[in-house]
Image (spheres, rainbow, N blue to C red):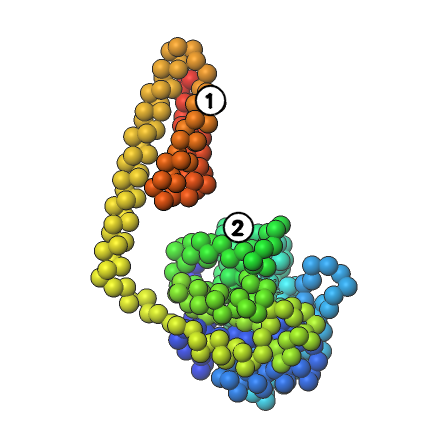
């Protein structure tokens, strides 16, 4: 992918790049009041939802086109850049007409290649930064596919927003962070800026600070945080919005560690980990070789591959040993189940040769 900087004049790459504003803009007064407070706190990019994808009908689905005039007013009166979510070609058209500076594609939309393609087609030839939220389902290829659709349409100023992934069973988080997915995205596209959306991951105010800190520790570039002048009265996502004042407090408490700060000690520990991993690989290879020999033996003696009794014995034995080594028996059980499954697969292959 050919990428260019998403930074707009006056915005530096200093971490975190912050985008803040209400989940939904609701009234002119709420929009201007929130925006002015955020500008006073030094926020330079204002977000506001105009069209809101709601899980169920009956909720506030966004103010729509009239809200664009308030976004223009925000820009004029505070000097902040403005950003909104677009989900259709019509949204793109209206946003561009209103002079919106940054667009983002929401999590439900990025899960739908037809919708992403429609947006990409509508943006052909336009030079505007576009951020793409991860799809609601944890599918990194689908996320990357969305970037490729936009990139193929000539958009180079792209960025990612990690907003967590849906799950059936909501416990601590509203959307599970699954940090390994944005980390893998970073590995595949080191120049693609990544924002974290702690509001949608956490779903509650108390989680905004710790999730933001985690994102900074993982070297993410920015944060997009929902902020409302009166969060309790918000028409959408009330429980995850914070006042501009609380936002300032949270941002001031963030510890920003430099990537280059890795100490001698850390490098030494990493070498040790690499060595352990190499040993694990060598041992696994040896184990699989032996498993294949057993497969040959079973074939020659006309024995079945699976001997359930032995498998359960192994699992029980290792769970007990794991505990005595200070390891979590559930974790060890999972590891051995995976190893056993692979041994069985290899033996089945031998028997059927
Ligand atoms: C939002 O940013 O308000 C929003 C609807 O987010 P998501 O697409 O991540 O659910
Ligand atoms: Mn929201």
Which residue is rendered at x = 58% and y = 55% of the image?
171
For mark 1, what is the residue? 309
Q: Quadrant of the C terminus?
A: top left
Camera-nearest residue between 195 and 316: 316
User: Is 165 drawn above or below residue 191 in the view shown?
Assistant: above
Which residue is rendered at x = 51% and y = 64% of the image?
161
> Residue 38 appears in which quarter of the rendering?
bottom right
10 Å crowding of disc 2: few (<14), some (14-19), many (20+): some
In the picture, measured across the screen, residue 214 lies left or right of residue 135, that is left
Q: Which mark identifies residue 139?
A: 2
- For the residues marked 2 and 1, what is the alpha-carbon distance in whole angstroms? 37 Å
In the picture, measured across the screen, residue 322 lies left or right of residue 134, that is left
User: Is 147 drawn above or below residue 99 in the view shown?
Assistant: above
Residue 302 appearing in the image: yes
The secondary element bearing badge 1 is classed as: helix
Q: Quadrant of the N terminus?
A: bottom left
Mark 2 or mark 1, earlier in chain? 2
In the picture, measured across the screen, residue 211 lies left or right of residue 286, that is right
Which residue is rendered at x = 69% and y = 59% of the image?
55
User: Is 284 drawn above or below residue 70 in the view shown?
Assistant: above
């Amino acid at each position: 992918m050919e990428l260019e900087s998403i930074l707009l004049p006056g915005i530096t790459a200093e971490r975190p790049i912050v985008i803040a504003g209400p989940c939904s803009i609701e009234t002119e007064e709420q929009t201007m009041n929130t925006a002015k407070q955020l500008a006073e706190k030094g926020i330079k990019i204002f977000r506001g939802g105009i069209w809101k994808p709601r899980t169920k009908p009956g909720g506030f689905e966004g103010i729509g086109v009239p809200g664009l005039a308030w976004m223009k007013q925000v820009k004029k009166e505070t000097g902040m850049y403005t950003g909104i979510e677009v989900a259709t070609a019509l949204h793109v058209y209206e946003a561009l007409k209103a002079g919106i500076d940054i667009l983002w594609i929401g999590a439900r939309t990025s899960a739908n290649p037809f919708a992403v393609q429609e947006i990409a087609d509508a943006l052909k030839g336009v030079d505007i930064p576009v951020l793409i939220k991860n799809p609601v389902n944890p599918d990194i290829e689908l996320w990357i596919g969305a970037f490729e659709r936009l990139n193929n349409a000539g958009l180079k100023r792209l960025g990612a927003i990690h907003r967590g992934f849906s799950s059936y069973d909501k416990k601590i988080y509203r959307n599970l962070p699954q940090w390994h997915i944005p980390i893998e995205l970073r590995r595949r596209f080191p120049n693609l800026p990544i924002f974290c959306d702690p509001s949608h991951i956490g779903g509650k105010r108390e989680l905004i600070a710790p999730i933001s800190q985690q994102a900074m520790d993982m070297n993410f570039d920015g944060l997009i945080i929902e902020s409302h002048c009166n969060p309790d009265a918000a028409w959408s996502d009330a429980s995850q919005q914070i006042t501009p004042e609380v936002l300032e407090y949270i941002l001031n408490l963030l510890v920003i560690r430099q990537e280059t700060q890795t100490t001698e000690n850390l490098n030494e520990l990493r070498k040790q980990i690499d060595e352990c991993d190499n040993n694990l690989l060598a041992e696994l290879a040896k184990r699989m070789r032996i498993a294949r020999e057993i497969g040959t033996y079973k074939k020659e003696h006309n024995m079945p591959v699976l001997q359930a009794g032995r498998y359960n014995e192994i699992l029980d034995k290792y769970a007990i040993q794991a505990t005595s080594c200070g390891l979590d028996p559930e974790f060890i059980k999972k590891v051995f189940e995976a190893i056993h499954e692979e041994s069985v697969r290899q033996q089945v292959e031998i028997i059927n040769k």
